[in-house]
Image (spheres, grey):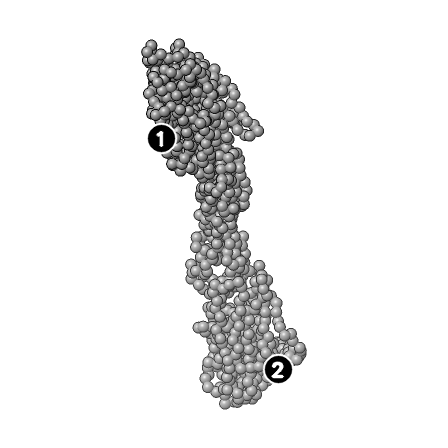
Amino acid sequence: MGVWWGPVVRVLVLQAAWALGGGQVRYSVPEEARAGTVVGRLAQDLGLEAGEPEARRLRLVAQGRRASVEVSGASGALVVSSRLDREELCGKSAPCALRLEVLVERPLRVFHVELEVTDINDNAPLFPAARKNLSIAESSLPGSRFPLEGASDADIGANAQLSYILSPSEHFGLDLQKSNERNIVPDLVLTKPLDRETMPVHRLVLTASDGGRPSLSGTMELVISVLDANDNAPQFNQSVYKVQLPENAAEGTLVAQVDATDPDEGTNSEVTYTATSFIPLSGRDVITVNPKTGEIRLTGALDFEEVSIFDFRIEVRDKGTPPLSGHCSVELEVVDVNDNAPEVWVTSLSVPVAEDASVGTVVALLSVSDRDSGANGRVRCAVWPAGPFGLVATFAGSYSLVLREALDRERVSEYEVEVRAEDGGAPPLRASRGVRVPVSDVNDNAPAFAQAVYTVLARENNAAGAELARLWARDPDEAGNGRVSYSVAEGGVGGASAGGGWRPASSYVSVDAESGRLWALQPLDYEELQVLQFEVRAVDAGEPPLCGNATVQLFVVDENDNAPALLPPAGGGPGPGASGEAAWVPGAGAWWAWAAWGAPAGQVVAKIRAVDADSGYNAWLRYELWEPRGKGPFRVGLYSGEVSTARALEEADGPRQRLVIVVRDHGEPARSATATLSVSLVEGGEAALAATGSSSSAASGVEGGASSSSRNVWLVVAICAVSSLFLLAVVLYGASRWAPRAAVLSGPGPATLVCASEVGSWSYSQRQSRSLCVADGAGKSDLMVFSPNFPPPPGAAAKETQPEPPALLDTVSGPSFLASRPFPRRPFPPAPWAVGGGSRAQPPVPVVHCIPGQ
């Protein structure tokens, strides 16, 4: 056997080649090849370089049966791994081809390999029995034929082609008959009349040899007994019975009814039936014949996928002495029915699938088969639900599950895909296989804030570390791709301090990286910073990281933390009988003024000026006469700070009056400052001269050694100049009083400081008054309206009342508010509404300042 083994292997290996048109490799290997035998250089035939088979995990995937071959990881060769028995794998089917799938990774590819297991002559012919007993009547005529049970060979082709030889005998010969296209049946032929008395028993040997090289043979001993008398054998009405039955025929189904007749009489004509010579031998288990009636019935289940045709003989034997027999052939063809559902296997699965995977990505490889034949074995496959996956047929019975649509993990994080298979039978049979396909996340969503602009109101003088607001950005990604950290953008807008310097936003506030809480790093001072605008950035932890921004507008709400501050006189003095500024003595903290005896009620003798660094109500000042209490000769304008006579001055009032004036703001709690004013009562001319002289001496200090004549000359010049300026001021005042004025004063920039006049005063901090604007709407005003103070008519000082004014309006517009603080209501003084003075009562005119939104 070793003589021919090597050449056969070499020839078979040389015959293996690519089927380039179908993308398939075919190899042949003889059965019973030793383990380790190289079938073919698979890696080389697939076009893989050295080292690639192991790096790309070249491996073999079998389909539902043991392949008995494997891929060598180092060399990439296809080698025999276990015993190959063609008869066990394929039975009598020819050719015996095994379909294999070979996978390589990076990238994932599938190759189809067809391995043909060729037959070798490893099975000798086998008779059903080692000994066969025959009974032949001595009256049998030469030429009589006696069918013998032929041998069977499990091999195929030439290795199964049998020839028979009978041992030498002068009475018997051998004749070979073809029962059908596949089988040759030997018949024992009587060549010379028998003589029982000469030789009652004949012993012959029947040898069956196959066509293999070398040939194998099997023998059966024939023991022939020569019988006397009964010289007529039973005969069937036909020599061959052909029957078709569906494979789902139930047990007990009638296959055929055979009938034989014997012309003899008596017991020699009584016959019995026996089934013999089954091909294949498994037919004994599913077919039986009634010995009396000749009915052939099923005793087991048929299976077309295992055996499609049963060949056997029916022997009829009479009861004569000796008994004679007759034979007929029965051919049972099994008809296929759709009794096998399709089978679906997942041979390779690449999960999870990234949500940014391109269309056409292979997710899984599947193999589908049906054991039925014809239309019953044709399988159709589909995917349910239809999207986003589909099936692509790569080879007969092989499919790829591919991506048909783009994935979005935030919408669907996992798919349950069902591959459904249906054959073409009637009714069709179905099978399915579930495939779970999780979707892995990629960083494709940037953090997004709920608002583009956040408006935050914070009180000044807040504690360092106080929480101002809480920001939150949503990122629908998962794990690190959805973990958001917050920071104040370094390139964002900072805040401008009152001194004109610019400081970055990070010096005022900080944001917690994890929670998004906005903290104050230091106490805020409204007088230093009114509005702080900056950006907060939210960055996820993906690769690459994505970010989103939100603008934060932080408005500092003023607190009453500054007391009113008294201002020194503006310079100069009034003429006799006119209002003027009080003289301030440096270092003494006191104001001086002069008034003439007999001055009428309502004459202004001095004006106290003060300013408050706060804004709004906190900077709105009022003036009160603290001393002397009761009905004195002087009074103070509640909001103007003008000190005027409450009645005509008399000599009984004394030469000097000391007034204590308290300046208060409208904050909570109110803050105040105190001014002491000394008013000297003199004659009318002396009052004007004294006022001018005192003012000049207060401004320049006390000068010793100056001549009185030079001083008088300069006093006269000063009086004239002051009088001229006063007249010019009166003219301008009258012109502005009756001139038409605009209905609305608006515009950005610092607010104008309104000075006192005879009709009232407006004490206002020198700060910027703004209205807030956002990008998606019109500006809204931060409106603060104050009422000027008019001097009451003589005698009405004690009857001042303070009716409730309209509420102070504070309006802030923005996408949302994290905090808000309405200004408190305050009473307004009783006076007609006017702007800039005047005698006509007018409603208040709002002053609007707007900064365009970012």
Q: Which mark is residue 305?
A: none
Q: Residue 445 or 793: which is nearer the viewer? A: 445
Q: Residue at x 45, y 64 (%)?
A: 461
Q: Residue 441 or 87: which is nearer the viewer? A: 87
Q: Residues within 10 Å of mark 2 (few under 14, many from 20)?
A: few
In this picture, is 280 found above or below 802? above
Q: Residue 827 or 817: which is nearer the viewer? A: 817
Image quarter of the C terminus = bottom right
At mark 1, the secondary structure is: loop
Question: Which kind of residue does numbered mark 2 sit on?
Answer: Arg
Give the quarter of the image for residue 192: top left
- Measure the C-alpha gap from mark 1 to mark 2: 143 Å
At mark 2, the secondary structure is: loop
Residue 722 location, x and y as percent? 63, 77
Q: Residues within 10 Å of mark 1 (few under 14, many from 20)?
A: few
Q: Which mark is residue 292?
A: 1
Q: Residue 794 or 465: which is nearer the viewer? A: 465
In this picture, is 796 found above or below 418? below
Residue 238 location, x and y as percent? 45, 27
Q: Which mark is residue 840?
A: 2
Give the quarter of the image for residue 347: top left
* First-in-chain label (1 vs 2): 1
Residue 472 location, x and y as percent? 47, 56
Camera sees residue 120: no
Question: Which kind of residue does numbered mark 1 sit on?
Answer: Lys
